[in-house]
Amino acid sequence: MALLAIAAAKVKEWAQARVARERTDTFADGTTRASRFIFTENALYANRDGIWQTMQVSWAQRRAELAAFSHRMRAQQWLLAIQEHRPW
């Protein structure tokens, strides 16, 4: 029973809305480091140097990322709707 509860929680966790971002930092000596992030409603996951980690992030930061994601999704849906209904 406990195994099913854990599996259900994991499925629910990965089914939630998320935003993926990539960033490259350039340091004073000219070296760069690429980072990948996944923001969810409940956590932030970061990949630096090939290692995935759970990171701390405030609710305000998560909310801002999810709002930006939601806005981009609405804009994409609107553009697709326009393209599908072009009279020409």
Image (cartoon, rainbow, N blue to C red):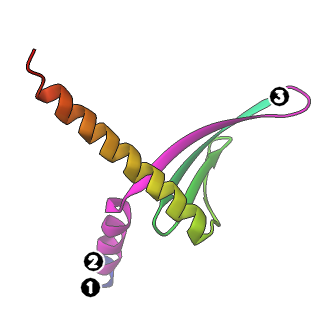
- Determine the image quadrant of residue 18: bottom left
Label 3 to label 1: alpha-carbon separation: 50 Å
Residue occupying the point 19% across, 31% down: 82
Residue span colored magenta: 4-31
Q: Residues within 10 Å of mark 3 (few under 14, many from 20)?
A: few
Q: Quadrant of residue 76?
A: top left
Residue drawn at 62 percent across, 69 percent down: 58
Bin the neighbour count of mark 1 within 10 Å (Cα to Cα): few under 14, some 14-19, many 20 and up: few
Q: Say which residue label 3 marks.
A: 31
Q: Is residue 59 left or right of residue 9?
A: right
**Chain-order first, disc 2 or disc 3:** 2
Q: Is residue 56 above or below residue 31?
A: below
The three-letter amino acid code for the residue at tag 2 is: Leu
Image location (x, y in percent) of residue 70: 38, 52
- Percent x, y for residue 86? 12, 23
State how far apart marks 2 and 1 are (Cα).
5 Å
Residue farthest along the top direction in this orientation: 88
Which marked residue is nearer to the observer: mark 2 or mark 3?
3
Q: Is residue 15 magenta?
A: yes
Residue 14 position (above or below residue 3)? above
Q: Residue at x 56, y 48 (%)?
A: 37
Residue sitting nearer the eye, 67 or 45:
67
| Residue underneath mark 2 | 4
Q: Which mark is residue 53?
A: none
Is 62 colored magenta in this rendering? no
Q: Quadrant of the C terminus?
A: top left
Quickly name the residue at label 1. 1
